[in-house]
Amino acid sequence: MEDNNADGLDIGHIYVKWTNEYKKAREYLFGMEETEQNFKVALELFMEESVKGSALAMFDIGRIYSDGLGVEIDMVKAHNYYEKALFGFQKTESQKAWEYTEYRIGKMYSQGLGTEKDLKKAAYWFNLSAGKRYKYAQYSLGGLYYRGQGVEQDFQTAFSLYINSTKQGFPYADLEVAKMYRDGVGINKDANESNHYFEKAFVGFEKLEKQSCDDKIQYRLGWMLQNGIGTHRDILKAKEYFEKSAKFGNIFACYSIAKIILAEDNPTDEEVKKAIDYMHIASDSGNKFAQYSLCKIYLEGKHTMKDIKKAITLLTLSAEQDNEFAAYKLGMIYLKDEEVSKDINKAITFLTQSAEKNNEWASYQLGKLYLMGMNIPKDTEKAIEYLTKSADQGNQFAQYVLGKLFLIGKDVPKDKETAIKFFTLSAEQGNEYAKFFLENMDKFRETSVGLCASRMFHHMSKIFEDNIPLNKSKSGLKIDSKLLRKLKAKKISQGHKRDDHEERMTL
């Protein structure tokens, strides 16, 4: 955010002023009620201002080349102009301390524009500006304290800075205060205060958007309308704001509008093409969620030609950015021997990466693999470790497997109480197998449990697949065909595919 009411300073041939010429260039860049958006004209006007020495124009030229607004993306040119802008802000500040230039310098260090990213320096400059009650700097410094970036994490200080910013009418700060009241971070939970600040933020964003047509504000408005936060839920209006924002290359807006279109019941071919184009823009910009979503499109071949090679490339890019879902899906692809040749080493690598990010399904799959010892050395200790980790995260399938292991007592000490605990946790989530064992626990004799052990391990790899094995136990117990049909129907209604469980991912 910037203050377009800043008076401005002129130091020699470098100046930081919102001149009429600069404001006109901004109107063409963003498009106003009386000025149609025109990136080419905007660039020409910014160039004229830049030659005169406008640091503000230099910055905006950097953004145009960085985001590819009406031109080919050119990061070298973008960096050069950002570097010139930073020099201009610093030179102006060196002649006369000013909260506006202090804030702008801090923003450039925080984002690594025209210089290396340096959050400590960013905090220093934001602190200078915030000390002069500059609301934008108060908000930005609050964010650093909230995340512990460049400063020691301190939620109370973050809240205080956000509150000071809200008192001066800054909707971004309203939004953060609302979330802190909602989550009880840095302040006691207060639903009424949270709703008040969410509503205040929405109204504030609407006013700002009319004044500046900022893509970040448009994205925020779309997000709030999409989720019914601070206002009533309105997907059509959310789409409009996302589309406005996406025209400026906002990758979050590109991703969001693509997801909305592809989730519609009957999108037109033109809409689908637009959605995939937007998804590509976000993906090419390094958005790990867009890469993941796009890979699923290529894997399924639903809206475009199926392309496994592209899908795996996108998944790999997303996984490299620590996307646990992408790592899990890659692990399962290399494990199944369907889309690509089975590669157990790659499967273990990606599943482990996902499990380390606390993906319960990755932990569950690793637990099964180490338990069965198929294609890898059997490791009961690791199996129990991963299954327990998954079970502790509420995975009913891991809970069920652990229940059977402790009931049978093979490779682990037999422990009926622990078995009942895990069966109960699983059954409470609707697992019919766990319910079956709990209801028939007393019917298992010592000998029958032992005889069941080998069969249990034989079928362990097929647990919860669509084709449930029909095996009679020596105790005379079996799951009847009616129950089997019920279980199959339930699985299908829940959308489960064979061994392919994953959580829904949201941005």
Image (cartoon, rainbow, N blue to C red):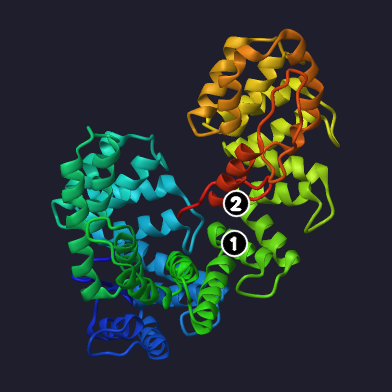
User: Which residue is found at the position 29% from the left and 66% from the top?
Assistant: 234
The answer to whether 472 is drawn above or below residue 361 in the figure is: above
Marks 2 and 1 in Cβ contact (< 8 Å): yes
**Left/right of residue 46 with respect to residue 309 in the rendered view:** left
Q: Which quarter of the rendering shows the C terminus?
A: bottom left
Question: Which mark is drawn over residue 360?
Answer: none
- Residue 463, image x and y in percent? 70, 36
Work out whether residue 324 can be spotted.
no
User: Which residue is found at the position 80% from the left and 26% from the top?
Assistant: 455
Residue 158, by quadrant, is top left
Please name whichever residue, 250 or 333, is drawn nearer the observer in this view of the structure: 333
**Left/right of residue 180 with respect to residue 251 in the rendered view:** left
Tell which residue pokes out farthest to the left in this image: 167
Please name whichever residue, 79 or 370, is drawn nearer the observer in this view of the structure: 370
**Mark 1 is on which residue type?**
Gln
- Residue 224, image x and y in percent? 30, 60
Q: Disc 2 or 1, which lies upstream in sequence?
A: 1
**Mark 2 is on which residue type?**
Gln
Alpha carbons under labels 2 and 1: distance apart: 10 Å
Q: Which quarter of the rendering shows the N terminus?
A: bottom left
The answer to whether 141 is drawn above or below residue 357 in the figure is: below
User: Which residue is found at the position 46% from the left and 80% from the top?
Assistant: 69
Label 2: how many residues lie within 10 Å, few (<14), some (14-19) or many (20+)? some
Q: In this figure, which residue is indicated by the disc labeled 2?
A: 321
SS of the residue at dot 1? Answer: helix
User: Which residue is found at the position 69% from the left and 10% from the top?
Assistant: 414
Q: In this figure, which residue is indicated by the disc labeled 1?
A: 291
The answer to whether 188 is drawn above or below residue 172 in the figure is: above
